[in-house]
């Protein structure tokens, strides 16, 4: 960080990996420091992780994130230490090690103040947790968007509306009508979101059945799934239904382009009635980064729209309530407050939650962020691409 003189006023600056325009490569440059406002913490970033949404925004933001203004700093996953706290912050002090969900690319937020891919960033206190002493910054950085999206799917009333970890089990209540635990279906248990969904559902006291490629089956079991079937197997739906074995299904979380159709079939055959979808049914990979999005985007977005409409109709006909999950929608709700102020800190400290997936550190310094985004886009298996700063 440096101090520059601009029009006679000292302006502190720091480095950021900046997206100057839609579909441009990230460029490391100096940007003004931010002051934390009320309920915010300023963090010296030590590790960031990359999500599929980062290359989606970089490559298609002009049509998918139309509200985003440029220049912008992307990124959701941050770990580091607190440099300053804003008014009203009670949970953190300067010097605390923390990790948190950066929401700068959300509608109405400021991507230059609140994006992850920079030396210092502003996090909301309510989306920040203390990093336990046994967890490194690279490990903590894998969690924010994965755990938040999983929590939205599992716990928000608009989705599965399940009991959260730490809630008392009241046999006979609406969640446990027959005094049995109920089983959650997580299709895509070896994705970043899926691993967090498996361990959060298990920590909340539910049984979990899931899918993964055979090489990741043991890992997903170790997070708490009692049945893991191969999502590449043409009979995966049948195997999951067999694995559920008559248990009461409390809902399904669908991760991966083909997952919603498969989950609807599992729910239909097992009497489950709630589906949380986190993935678009058509990959945007073919669009991201094209020099011209128009007209290539037209058939892709038409397919996305038609497939979503068809899936929603199919679900409704089967008596299944379905909705699309937005991972940062917990910013202002009780699920977000509890996940970030109780569940993650407690679970990581007592070992009921693990920092998953494993961090794959691909470089050090902001100059490595573009490489990291390209690496995540090329495909990962049960790993989270991380850059340390
Ligand atoms: N809506 C939101 O707010 C939100 C937020 C975050 C992510 N997402 C979406 O959620 C999905 C997962 O994101 P992520 O970051 O968790 O992904 P990720 O970790 O990059 O996903 C990679 C994983 O996908 C798995 N996979 C491969 N084939 C699959 C299949 N047929 N079905 C299910 N999984 C399969 C692979 O597991 P194996 O190697 O074991 O096959 C691999 O580990 C993506 O579609 C992402 O865009 C949405």
Image (cartoon, helix red, strand yellow):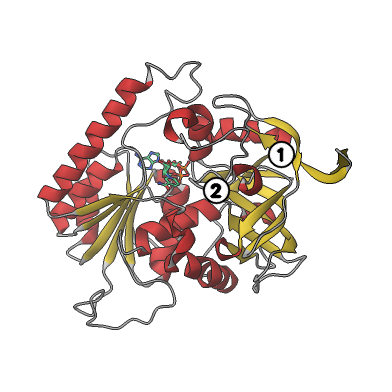
Q: Is residue 70 positioned above or below 340 on the image? A: above
Q: Is residue 55 positioned above or below 78 on the image? A: above
Q: Residue at x 41, y 52 (%)?
A: 194
Asked whether the beta carbons under mark 2 and mark 1 sit within 8 Å of each other, the answer is no
- Residue 1 makes an appearance in the image: no
The residue wearing badge 1 is 16
Q: Nearer the viewer, mark 2 or mark 1?
A: 2
- Give residue 41's mark: none
Element marked by disc 2 = loop
Ligand 1 found in image quarter: top left
Q: Residue at x 65, y 70 (%)?
A: 89
- Residue 201 makes an appearance in the image: yes
Element marked by disc 1 = strand
The residue wearing badge 2 is 109
Nearer to us in this view, 42 or 379:
42
Query: Where's residue 73, x and y in %?
Result: 63, 39
Rendered image quadrant of residue 250: bottom left
Quadrant, the N terminus: top right
Q: Residue at x 76, y 66 (%)?
A: 94
Q: Residues within 10 Å of mark 1 (few under 14, many from 20)?
A: many
Q: Is residue 120 positioned above or below 128 on the image? A: above
Upstream in the sequence, badge 2 or badge 1? 1
Query: Where's residue 61, x and y in %?
Result: 49, 31
Query: Where's residue 227, x and y in %?
Result: 32, 57
Please indicate whether residue 149 sits to the left or right of residue 238 in the image: right
Q: Residue at x 27, y 28 (%)?
A: 303
Quadrant, the C terminus: top right
Nearer to us in this view, 295 or 95:
295
């Amino acid at each position: 960080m440096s101090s520059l003189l601009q029009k006679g006023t000292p302006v502190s600056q720091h480095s950021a990996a900046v997206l100057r325009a839609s579909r441009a490569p990230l460029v490391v440059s100096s940007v003004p420091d931010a002051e934390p406002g009320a309920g915010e913490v300023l963090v010296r970033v030590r590790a960031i992780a990359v999500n599929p949404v980062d290359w989606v925004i970089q490559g298609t933001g002009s049509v998918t994130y139309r509200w985003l203004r440029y220049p912008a700093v992307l990124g959701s996953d941050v770990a580091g230490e607190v440099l300053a706290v804003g008014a009203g912050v009670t949970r953190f002090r300067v010097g605390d090690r923390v990790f948190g969900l950066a929401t700068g690319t959300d509608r109405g937020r400021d991507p230059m103040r609140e994006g992850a891919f920079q030396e210092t960033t502003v996090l909301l206190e309510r989306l920040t947790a203390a990093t336990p002493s046994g967890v490194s910054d690279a490990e903590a950085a894998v969690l924010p968007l994965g755990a938040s999206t999983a929590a939205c799917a599992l716990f928000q009333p608009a989705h599965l509306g399940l009991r959260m970890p730490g809630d008392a089990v009241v046999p006979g209540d609406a969640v446990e009508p027959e005094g049995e635990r109920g089983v959650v279906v997580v299709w895509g248990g070896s994705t970043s979101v899926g691993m967090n969904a498996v361990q959060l559902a298990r920590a909340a006291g539910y049984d979990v059945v899931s899918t993964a490629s055979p090489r990741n089956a043991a890992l997903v079991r170790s997070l708490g799934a009692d049945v893991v079937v191969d999502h590449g197997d043409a009979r995966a739906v049948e195997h999951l239904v067999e694995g559920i074995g008559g248990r009461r299904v409390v809902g399904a979380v669908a991760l991966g382009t083909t997952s919603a159709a498969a989950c609807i079939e599992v729910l239909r055959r097992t009497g489950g009635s709630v589906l949380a979808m986190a993935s678009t049914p058509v990959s945007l990979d073919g669009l991201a980064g094209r020099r011209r999005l128009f007209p290539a985007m037209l058939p892709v977005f038409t397919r996305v729209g038609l497939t979503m409409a068809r899936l929603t109709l199919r679900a409704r006909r089967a008596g299944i309530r379905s909705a699309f999950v937005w991972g940062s929608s917990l910013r202002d709700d009780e699920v977000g407050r509890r996940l970030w102020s109780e569940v993650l800190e407690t679970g990581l400290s007592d070992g009921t939650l693990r920092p998953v997936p494993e961090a794959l550190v691909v470089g050090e310094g902001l100059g490595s962020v573009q490489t990291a985004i390209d690496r995540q886009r090329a495909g990962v298996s049960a790993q989270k691409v991380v850059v340390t700063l």
